[in-house]
Amino acid sequence: DAKTTQPNSMESNEEEPVHLPCNHSTISGTDYIHWYRQLPSQGPEYVIHGLTSNVNNRMASLAIAEDRKSSTLILHRATLRDAAVYYCILRDVRRNTGNQFYFGTGTSLTVIP
Amino acid sequence: GAGVSQTPSNKVTEKGKYVELRCDPISGHTALYWYRQSLGQGPEFLIYFQGTGAADDSGLPNDRFFAVRPEGSVSTLKIQRTERGDSAVYLCASSLTGTGGPTDTQYFGPGTRLTVL
């Protein structure tokens, strides 16, 4: 699976939108983009995933660049509960040996009240 | 509903001892994954089970690490002759099918914090 690059940390004010970037310049056509987040002292939890088109769910939106070499996770209105480490992960859908993920170091998001 | 549970939540042991870490996946999930997370790092894949069999154990660091899932549900990660470098949070996750499809969401447990003195 191709690698991703994320900023180590970001800050946001409470109730402001947050844009978390992820670069994946070596992405292949069959790589899905997954985002998970890890709240303090918890295991990671699913946020959103996409392939080519932008995606929205109740937690966030995922904007994918036209060339797919980058993507952005958008939290529309940050709350203190959104303070977490956010991981951008690529997963080749052709792999048939399980759905194991290869995490990077992620982006640590601080939300300022 | 019940999520993934892991026991114990904390384990302190001495160098050279044997430890077992338990994972109870979500009922009905055929795939189970073990990860290890060191301080300041993302989770590192260790092993993946499809049913009772270990389908991919490429992440196990050495032969001191072993995992089983005898009945296709509960899994135990076993570490022999523990070393200080084994200190980490051990995370377990499960997913419904493990087929690698994009909708096969992984659900993680809270982890077991292992400290080797």
Image: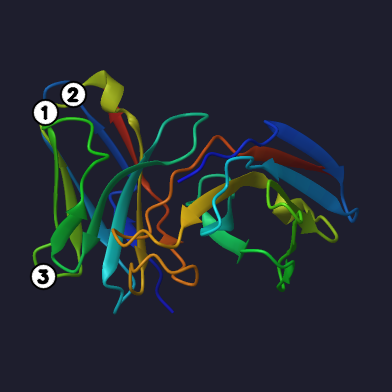
Whether residue B23 is situated above or below residue A13 in the rendered picture:
below
- How far is mark 1 from mark 2, CA to CA? 6 Å
Q: Amino acid at mark 3?
A: Glu
Secondary structure under tag 3 reads loop
Residue, disc 3: B71
Q: Amino acid at mark 1?
A: Lys
How many other residues sit within 10 Å of disc 2, few (<14), some (14-19) or many (≥20)?
some
- How far is mark 2 from mark 3, CA to CA? 30 Å
Residue, disc 2: B14
How many other residues sit within 10 Å of disc 1, few (<14), some (14-19) or many (≥20)?
few
Whether residue B69 is situated above or below residue B41 in the rendered picture:
below
Q: Residue at x 20, y 46 (%)?
A: B57
Horizontal and vertical percent position of residue B74: 20, 64
Residue B16 visible: yes
Report the disc number at residue B17: 1
- How far is mark 3 from mark 1, CA to CA? 26 Å
| Nearer mark to the viewer, of 2 and 3 | 3
Instruction: Compare marks 3 and 1 and give the one earlier in the sequence.
Output: 1
Instruction: Compare marks 2 and 3 and give the one earlier in the sequence.
Output: 2
How many other residues sit within 10 Å of disc 3, few (<14), some (14-19) or many (≥20)?
few
